[in-house]
Each structure stands twice: as C-alpha cells, then as structure tokens.
Amino acid sequence: MNPIHMIPWQNDFITALGDWLVQREDFQQATVIFTHRRPRQYLKRYLSEHPDLPRPCFMPTMTSVADFIGGLRSELGHAPLMQAKRLDQAELLYGIVRGLRQQGHGLLATLPQMERETFLPWGLELAKLMEELLRHNMEPADLAYMEHEVADYAAALLEQLRSIFNAYVEALHAHGWTTPGVDCCFAAEHTNDIISAHQNKPLIAAGFYALSGAEDALFRALWQHNILDVCWHTDPDLAHGGHGHWAATEHRHWLRNWQAQTRLLAEPVSRPLIKGVRFREGFDRHSQLAALKEELVSTKDANKTHENTAIVLPDAGALMPVLHHLPDEDVNISMGYPLERTSLARLVETIVTLRENRLDDGRYHWKDMVNLIRHPYIKMLGDQTSPDYRRVLFVWEASMRQGEPYVRPEDWVPAYGIKPLENIAEERCEPLRREVMRTCLENFENISTLSELADALNDLVTMLHANGPNIWKNFLIDAECLYRLASSVIPELKAPLSSNAEFSLPVLTSILRKLMQQERVSFEPDPITGLQVLGVLETRLLHFKRLFLLDAVEERLPGTNAADPLLPDPMRGLLGLPDSRERDNVAAYNFYRLVMGADQTVIFYQSGIQPGLLDGKSIRSRFVEQLLWEMEKAKGDVINTGDPEILPVNIKSGPVPHNPGDIAVTEDIRAALHDHLENKGLTPSKIDTYLHCPKRFFLGTLARLRPITEITEEADPAELGTLVHEVLREFFSGHMNRRIIPAELDATSLLALYEKRLKESELYQTLPYDGKTALAHTGRYRLERHLQAQQEPTTILGLETELTAEITVQKTVIPLRGTVDRVDQRDLDIRILDYKTGNLKKPGEKFWSDDELWQRMNDSDPADTALLPDLAKSMQSVQLPAYLHLYEHGKQADRAVNAALVDLKDTGREKTLFPDKWEREEMREIIEDQIPQLIYFLVTHIHDATVFPATPSSLCDWCDFKRICGR
C-alpha cells in the first residue's frame, strides 16, 4: 500500500502537488480528486507554466469529490438516475410515516395524525437526517425511550428510524431517484467494480481532511489496492511520528484507522508558528471595515497592487459592505452570496407580502403597493431612454398616497393626455403596467399548490427578462440571481410528488422563503490572480502571502450549531454520526492551515455589544484565543488590547451637531421674499412660524416645500380640528345676531350634525373600524363639553370672518390677512374666539408688562435674530394679538377688547388673552399701543431679514422639514 503523502501546511499546497505530479510516470493518466472545484483552476494554471512539462501534453483529469462520486454510476454502466428534490423527499417520508402510523405500532400510533403541511417541517428535517446517514453508509438503529429528550413526535420518528430509513431508500429506488447521499452509498457498495474500472487509472485524493463513512470505505478500498494515493496538507510533525497540532486531529485519527505509513513530499518552509499575525479589535463591523481599508492601503506591493492577497469572510453577508471599502483595482470574488439578500429576493418578498396582507375582497395595503412599484426592477422595465413609464408609476404612487389604506390596483386608470400625463402615449406604457399587475398581483391571488406558485414565479421571471434587458446586461450579479431563481428555486417547487398538493398560504410562502434562504449566488471569476475575496470554505487548499480575516468571533468561527429538533447534537453519537466536535475540528483545520501558510495575517474581530437577546457581548473566536496564547508563550508576557499585537480601531468622533445650518438671504431670496410680502402678504400663522423658527418659515413659505402626502391610518388631529370647526360653524350659523346662551341650545342636534359630517368626510372613509369609533366618540365628547361650558349670554356676530389690514414697511405695503372662527358680542364689547383642538398657546399676563423685553424690541436691529427665541418663549403665539389687530382695522374701532382660545381638546372653556379682572381701559391700551408695535416689529423683522436661522426646540420633532433641515 502506498504511504500517505504529506505537504507541510506552511508550504503552498498547489505548487508542491504540481511538482510531485510532474515527476510521476502516470502523469497524463492520473485523476486528481479535490475537496471542491476551485483548486483545480490553480493547479491548471501552475502546470501550464511548469518548466519541466513537455509541450504539448495532456494534463491529469481534475475533479471534485462530489463530481467524481456522482459520475461513478455512469462510469460503471448503470442507468442514470434523476436527482430527487428536497420537497419530494419530504413527500416520500410523509407517505412512509403515515403508513407506519396506520400499522399501529409504537409511540407514533398514539399521536394524532399529522396532515401534510403540518408534517412538512419534520419531513425536511427527517430528509436531512436520511441524507447524512446515506453519506456515512450506515443503516441506523431505532432510538427508543427518547420522549424526555426531544418532542413527542420526534421521539416517535426516532423510535422507528430503521424502518423509515429502509422504506425511504426503497422508495427512492422505486422512483428512479438519487441524491448525493445515495451516490455515496452506491460507491461504497460497489468498491470492487470501481477497483476493476480503475486498474490502469490512478487516482490522487488531494487535500482531504475528514471523510464521510462512504468516502472512507471507497478511498480505503482503492488505497489498499494501490490505485489511490492520498495527499494531505497538514502539520509535518505527523510525518515524523509526532502528535502534531491539535487542528490536525482528524488526520491523526485517519492515520490510526488506516494503519498507514507517511511520506513528506517537501521540506517545511522555515516559518515560526505565529509569524506575522496581528489583530485588530473593532467595536462593530463598520470599524472593522475602516481598519481593513487602512491595512490595504499600507500593504500594497511594489506594483501598487495586492497580488497574492486574500480577504476572507466567515459571514457571506459582509460581502457587499466589504466591496465598498476595497481599493480601485481588479478584485476577484469566490464565494456564495445568499440569494435572500439580493434585490430579486426583495422583489419576491414584496410580492409575497402583498399577497399575505391582501384582504378577502381583493384590496391591497397601499404601503405594500408603493413598495412594489418603487422597486428598482419594476421602475427599470421598458425603454430606459424614455421616462414615460416611470412617470406613470410616479403618478400612480401619488394617487395611492392620497387615497384609502387599502386599494384595488385594477380600479386606477391613468389619465393619459391630461396633466401630468399629457405627453405620454397610452399604447407605450399601459400594456407594460398591466403586465406588471398581472405577473406581480393577479398570478399570486389564488395560488394553493407549489406548482401554481412555481408557475407564478416563472411568469415573473419571464416578464422581467423580456421587459428589462438592460438590467440583466448591465448588472451581471442581478442576472445571475434571476438565473438562480429560474434554474433552482422554481424547479424545486415543481417537484413531481408534492407540486399538486394543496397547502395554506402561510405554508406556501414559508416554503418559498426557506428555499430562497438556502440558495447561494456563486461568484467564480477567472483569472484567479490579484486581490481575492473568499469565504472560509473557498480557501481550502489555497495559499496566500497576505491574509485579512474579518469577523473572527465565536458565532462565525467555528460558528454556532443550528438547533436540530429531531436529533440534537448530544444524541448524534447514538447513531454514530459526527457531532459538533468534528465540525469544530474541520473549522479549526481550515483556519490554521490558512494562517500557517501566510507571511502576514491580520485578524479582525468585534468586541462591542451585539443588539439582540439580552444584548450579549461578541466573543472573539476560540481560534483567536489560541493564537494569542501561543504568542503570549513566545513573548513571555500577557498581551492586552493596545499592545502592538492587538491594535484597537479608533475612529474619531465628535458631538452630534444640534445647530442645523441657517439660510443666508441672497439677492434672489430677498427678491422672492419682497414679492411674497407684497402680493401674498402674511397671516398670523405665518408670523407665528417665523417667530418660532425663521428657517421653517423660509422652507414652507418661500421655498414652498411640502411634506409627502400619505394616507393617515389613524385619526389626524389636524383633519379632526378642521371637521370640528366646520360643524361648529354650521351649527351656530342658525343662531347668529340674536342673544343666546349656547349651553341652553339643543346638544342633540349638534352631535347629530357632527356624526353626519363625520361619515361624509374623506377622513372617516380611510379609517379602520376602531379608528372610526374612536373618532366618533372623541368628537361627540369634545363638542358636548364645549356647549356645556358656554354659560355666558352672547350674540354671535360672525363665523369664519375674513379680516384684512395693511402694514407699511419702508414704503412696502404688506397685506395682513386672517380668518377668525367666531366673533361674539358680550354686552357692549367684542370678543374674538379661536377654536383649538390641540395645545393652547397665547401670551401670558406678564408679557405685556415685561418692560425689559419691550425695550429690547424698541432697541433691536430688525435684522438681528437674537431676540426672537426670547420673544417666542415669552409670548408663545402671536395669533390672538394679531386677530385683535386685524379686527381693530377692519371693523368698528374701540369695540374689540378681548380674544380667547376655545379649549376643544379638554374642558371646552375659553382661555382669554387678557384676564377678566382687567379693566376695559387696560385692554384697550394694549390693543391700541402695544399690539401694533408688536406686529410692526415682527413684520419688519421678516421684511429686513438677512438670514433665516434654525431655532432648535421640542417643536423640531413634529416639523415637516426636520430631515432636510439637518436637525
């Protein structure tokens, strides 16, 4: 028997393997079997440049172990079999378990019968266990008395595991199906035939670490007949009879089990165990990426590139963020990226969510619809040189934002030929829009089987491919995602046995999400030079001089075991299956083999708090701890964060700015301001806005920015206030110009009027039932309280009265306009009322006697904004004084003496501007002297403004412009 050949893991495995192969006489007849496909690209490149090879010549056959074992059936002349789908495997098991239950034996017969969709999760777990048993070429024993170890149903399955396994294998053969596990089992059972077929075809098993049971049986038989040579990349100490590094444990077990001799193919490169290893400790992934960028900048070679450099990602989800931090040079990616993280998966998820949230009457939630038509793929369909189709989608979205919470997409018909679609031809856009509705909505409405779901997805793929050619030509990653959906996920849903079985919508969508979670979009670029970005498994057998390893935390290296409800990790040994210890050994071998061959290694890990369950702290990998221990032994001292070996990532940070930028008044802004003042004038509410935040005044009044209109799924306080105002105006209009006591009026008619107007309003139509009920009760309560609080006799002179005045500032006549809710005559005086359904804001009693503040107004430069915050804090609102000023100029003078806010939010009472204890002369003095001075000061301040500063306050949380303001 041949010895096991060893290449020291400090050396480049591909180079040493190539040199050894070139020396073999059977070079052209040999078949090299790798653990995966990528190493053969490196070996082919090395052999193509090897100086000792004659030209031309045939190279050895190079394949992966999966392809080699999968091709043995055809090589031995057996009929090819079809690969069984995962869902079909679960369906086979469903029939088997159901039949065993009907036989009435064991715990399974005492449990309720599971329907197909209830069994499906168990079936998928059971199929995974069957596959693993087949890969290890073992017939399982029944595991009895497991009721207190796992769930009852799992215990019932384990109790008859042997029967299930044998029936499952027979069912696969009966259907002419195979799986990778069945192929492994076939190879182990036909070793004699395989030996006969390869008598003159030498095999080399290159770079294996831990074998499955079937692989071990096959390789051992071939090795014992001198057909197979085994070549490891491992600790060279094993070749000298030593114990070797602990990460080479499985190789040590392999030597013992095979009773094999060893031979070292190359002398180890002289390199200390921990040469060039450094650590970078970051608080989160962003800090790791910042440190990675620093390291890449400082490690360029003489050609200003990163040749023979690898960035290794234990978490595939980090790929996209990493790509944004790489230098501007060619980068090769070799790893699988999760399909569920792609734009295509988001589109499928959006469609699935639309279907899940769809009402029984066929209406969809407006936010789900907006998410669909705003998806990049949907927006990029059609002719990209014309914006017509995107304009239609924009108008469609705007109409949904102003409609009801649930919409019928088929009810919306674009108004082609009318602004804003006046120049858009219907024949160009409408067929595509309807095709999108059909493939994204209609096709998914009545799905009840996996086959129907597959057909709907297939139509979606066809539509995207036909109408978005530019997407797939310009974005190759997206094209690969579309191909993966069409070639893997959809065929899986079309599995022969289960495709026509009916499932509920939650089960169908759950199956689809599960399949998409399991899919990976492969990146396998060529050439294989330059900066490499790889996953941990993709690094097997490869060698890099410079190595950057991210996310070296325990949950990534070696990683945590996924919970197995059927066969938990502690029970795997009962069946002879490898447990987490072997998995950790494999992870350790891949990690140490990679580090041992690198001249320079930088390992990044996170030490901050991970948000989540109990806010656990990220723990650096046990492999990092072991490397540190070796480094500390060599150094003779403890290594702490901050030492040269462990550098923390320090990112400069400063305080969060709380002073948003101001708007300087340019010549154009001043012209626009004066034009607005002359032609449109001011209102008390605009002056109030300027008083509290000049920047908000600029954005809303001069820039005329408006917040995005969206559907209010809860009662909007502003809309409720408008409705209450309208009801009170209509109710009191029948009682004008006569002396009344409002509390004695018929409250029933007021409440009936409110309910009628409420049900007629658009607000009421858009609310759910609980919102409608709450709004009805709230409005009735507030109106009834208000009517009861009006005990004083009064005569209503006006409702919704328009008032105007003019203020001249530097020869500029500025109109001042306002609308007062109600004007009452109380005895001989006039009181102006302003209804408020929100918070009450008015100047306090002390404001009028604050001589210091009034003197500051007199002395202040109109362009100085320093006074505004103090003035706003003291007076709170200018509306009531402004209404009195307007009435004074528009009606009979010397009559209006007070104004009040009507508290419709709480008590319904009036909150007067001036206290009732004041004499009439005191009120008139303020109205005639101080209020005009106040209004003139504020209007002049606006007119002469040189800057519109932001005034941060609690109001910023409710401001429509807080995002663009920078608050």
Image (cartoon, rainbow, N blue to C red):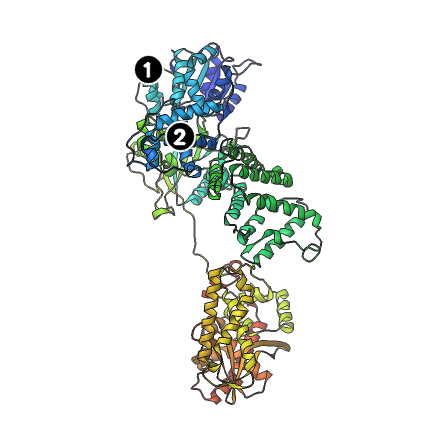
Judging by the rendered image, the residue that carries numbered circle 2 is 99
**Label number found at residue 259:** 1
Give percent across and percent down for residue 626: 32, 33
Q: Nearer the viewer, residue 310 or 806?
A: 806
How far from the left and from the top, in percent, is residue 904?
Answer: 47, 73
Residue 337's spot in the image, x, y percent? 49, 36
Q: Quadrant of residue 681?
A: bottom right
- Residue projecting furthest to the front: 103
The local secondary structure at tag 2 comes to: helix
Q: Does residue 541 appear left or right of residue 804 in this picture?
A: left
Tell me: residue 81, above or below residue 422.
above
Q: Which mark is residue 614?
A: none
From the viewer's perspective, is the residue at label 2 or at label 1 nearer? 2
Q: Mark 2, residues whose alpha carbon is within 10 Å: few (<14), some, or many (≥20)?
A: few
Q: Secondary structure at mark 1?
A: loop
Specify few, some or many for label 1: CA neighbours under 10 Å numbering under 14, 14-19, or 20 or more.
few
